[in-house]
Amino acid sequence: MASHGRPGAVRKTKKGPTIGTGGHGRQSLEGKGPTPKAEDRPYHKAYKNKELAERSAVKRAGGGKGAGTGRTKGKAAEEVVTGRNSVVEALRAGIPAKALHVAIRIEMDDRVRESLKMAAERGIPVMETGKPELDRMTDGAVHQGLMLQIPPYEYADALDLVDETIERYRRGHIGNAPLFVALDGITDPRNLGAIIRSASAFSSHGVIVPERRSVGVTASAWKTSAGAAVRVPVARVGNLNSALKSFKDKGIFVLGLDGDGDVSLPELTLGRDPICIVVGSEGKGLSRLVRENCDQIVSIPIDSAMESLNASMAVGITLYEVSRQRAV
């Protein structure tokens, strides 16, 4: 654009000073303002990159909150898996994926090739993404040019799951009485994954996790479950104690696992009945209110030199004993 000079500038001529022309075109410039940024101009490449980034950005949305009855439906936060080893392992484990982001002009190796191959086989969208955008989407984590977007886990409704299982049992559609596992204060996703795996191995009908102060179904839990998270539904409850009371009203016995139990596992007589096994964290064990809502506290006999068992191991041993009793 040609310049008209500075507004109000004075030019000296032989005839004396005259008013400059700088203000004559001011009206035609009104409303245009400063030049827009490149990312705000629709015809610019930066605008298209910004739109793509917004569409593929990870939405950090938490799950819904349930009522005091423990009835809730919610989603885990969407997350990402970063780094070549982690991405290829997640794909091998069959973790559900929303998209595989690959850096533009990425240096290919066996892990990248395998990731691309598995994504193609499973119909996972592959998106070429610039390094700055990958850095932003991963919060600066080391991604090595690969990032896997994991969709939120769709939690079952705990009370609906229990009702449906009881109805199927009454109609003879399942052979064994309803069997559930509930977690009280478990925060390690690998523990949850291992518990889901044991629940699948011993024909449990679902795993119950509290909405607060508890682990959810993350990519790490998916991977540790070795695919069992596809077969065993996980339900989230707003209030575990309210949910346990509802379970008891429906005829399900609630058994808490604790080293200081009043019933030793080999002497358990409720194995064939509808039951919900509750396990606490390795350090704190069952909370006081959960203990009070249990019909029995069951202990696993172990060597006195060992203080306690890992939560997932305790669940696995207990589910084995229940399975053994039901098979007799």
Image: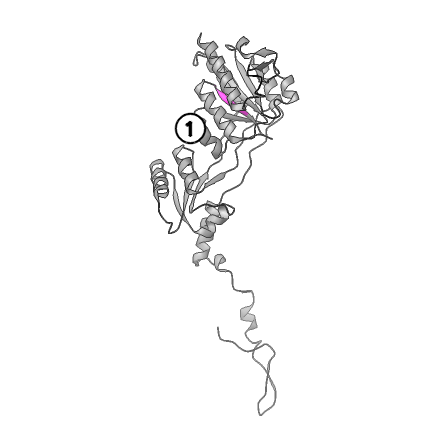
Q: Examine the rendering and report whether any part of residue 233 can be seen.
A: no
- Asked whether the viewer can see residue 54, the reply is yes
Which quadrant of the figure contains the C terminus?
Answer: top left
Name which residue lies at 45% across and 56% down: 46
Task: Give the farthest residue toward the bottom.
Answer: 14
Magenta residues, start to end: 204-208
User: With respect to residue 30, does 113 lie above or below?
Assistant: above
Q: Whole-percent x and y of residue 159?
A: 55, 21
x, y percent for residue 270: 54, 10
Q: Residues within 10 Å of mark 1 (few under 14, many from 20)?
A: many
**Colouring convention used in this rendered image of the protein:** one colour
The amino acid marked with disc number 1 is Gly
| Frontmost residue, 147 versus 321 | 321
Q: Which residue is mark 1?
A: 227
Q: How far across and down, in percent of the image, does residue 257 sit?
A: 57, 18
Q: Is residue 245 magenta?
A: no
Secondary structure of the magenta portion, mostly?
Answer: strand
Which residue extends farthest front? 305
Q: Is residue 207 magenta?
A: yes
**Is residue 248 found left or right of 319 in the rendered image?**
right
**Between residues 89 and 122, which one lies in front from this camera angle?**
89
Vertical order, 253 against 285 (above or below): above
- Left or right: residue 8 versus residue 76 is right
Q: How many marks?
A: 1
Q: Position of residue 309 (x, y in %)?
A: 55, 22
Q: What secondary structure is marked by label 1?
A: loop
Kindly identify the residue that appears in the image at 61 percent across and 90 percent down. Answer: 16
